[in-house]
Amino acid sequence: MRVLTRSVALFIAAAVLVPAARAIEIDYQFDPDRHNRFLSGFSTNPVQNPNVLGMPGLDFSGVGWGSDGERWKNVAMVTPQHFITADHAKPTVGSFLNFLGTDGVVRSYQVQSYIPLKYDADNPSNTSDLIVGQLSAPILASVPIKIYSVVRPGPFKYPLSKTPPKILDFYRGREMIVVGKNDVGGTDVDGDGYNDRGGKISKNVIDDVFVYQTVDASTNTVGVGFKSPPNTPDSGRFVGFDSGSPSFLLWDGQLTALGSHSVADFDVNPQYNGDGFLPYYIDQINALIAGSGYQLNVLSPERGRGRRK
């Protein structure tokens, strides 16, 4: 298990982080009818919960889960052929990802390959834990599976320290929706070893955008961090095997891709959680996938739009 530290350049003191590997826990007023993604049937015949977090408009159809022994893993689609996840917990090449469309039909797509990202685009030896996966065939526009846009107020600079503070300030204090891995245990009607209500979903508040790295500095990743305060309705915290599942920025009541779970500091109270931060990598990803004919859809927010806590 890799040990990671937050960059001292962005934090007053470094903190020990370890890969988040069990599902998001909601310790205060957990309600399965509010916090589970599915009402029943995961993973073979799932029924979407229409009232996750009491917000009927949330569309999780673009969140796919793995097959066979990787059913706990989740990814998020960001083009018709590309998804994001964590490098250290990515679904196996050749395996299948499953998506529950808004029409109630489950469709499967094969993982073809992965495209690694760089924390500093000019430093080829420094890889990110956020990684882009590619399907063997795109999801057709006629298929009701959500492709998530990304909200970015302006371009980031490489490395992160060169980015204007106002861009980072845009994210701080905004609401995020956090998807946990698909639970093992609990009700298991079909005997597949998984809770038939899938994973938990929480609502948290973005604390900061920062750099975290492995102790040997072989991996630097820009992350979006959030705390898990106690006695807070809907708040969740990472536990084991959450890695790779997505988080979303809640923007005008809709889900927009924000990142993939990567690390957590279990030794602080409240617990601190970190995702690989997708907006930082938009330009790099678009350059790398240009040959596919697809690009990330970037939303440039107008002043005053969106919800801030």
Image (spheres, rainbow, N blue to C red):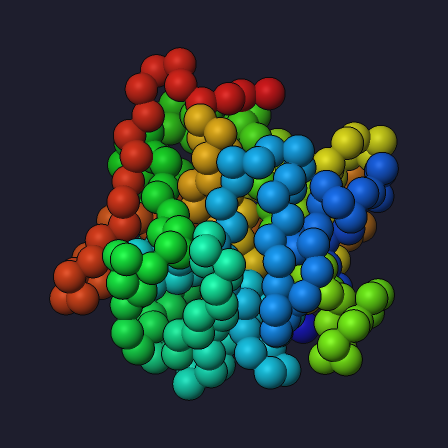
| Figure check: 164 above or below 102 | above
- Residue 238 appears in view: no
Residue 141 quadrant? bottom left
In the shown orientation, is residue 268 left or right of residue 7? Answer: right
Observer-nearest residue: 251 or 86?
A: 251
Observer-nearest residue: 244 or 51?
A: 51
| Figure check: 288 above or below 167 | below
Residue at image position (34%, 72%) is: 135
Locate residue 259, reporting x and y percent: 48, 50
Q: Quadrant of the N terminus?
A: bottom right
In the shown orientation, is residue 235 left or right of residue 284? Answer: right
Locate residue 242, reporting x and y percent: 65, 61
Q: Quadrant of the C terminus?
A: top right
Furthest residue toward bottom: 94
Observer-nearest residue: 103 or 92?
A: 103
| Figure check: 147 above or below 55 | below
Residue 30 quadrant? top right
Locate residue 166, reporting x and y percent: 39, 23
Residue at image position (66%, 33%) is: 54
Locate residue 219, reporting x and y percent: 48, 64
| Figure check: 104 above or below 201 | below
How many callouts does the rendering have? 0
- Residue 112 appears in view: yes
Residue at image position (44%, 26%) is: 252
Residue at image position (43%, 46%) is: 257
Furthest residue toward top: 304
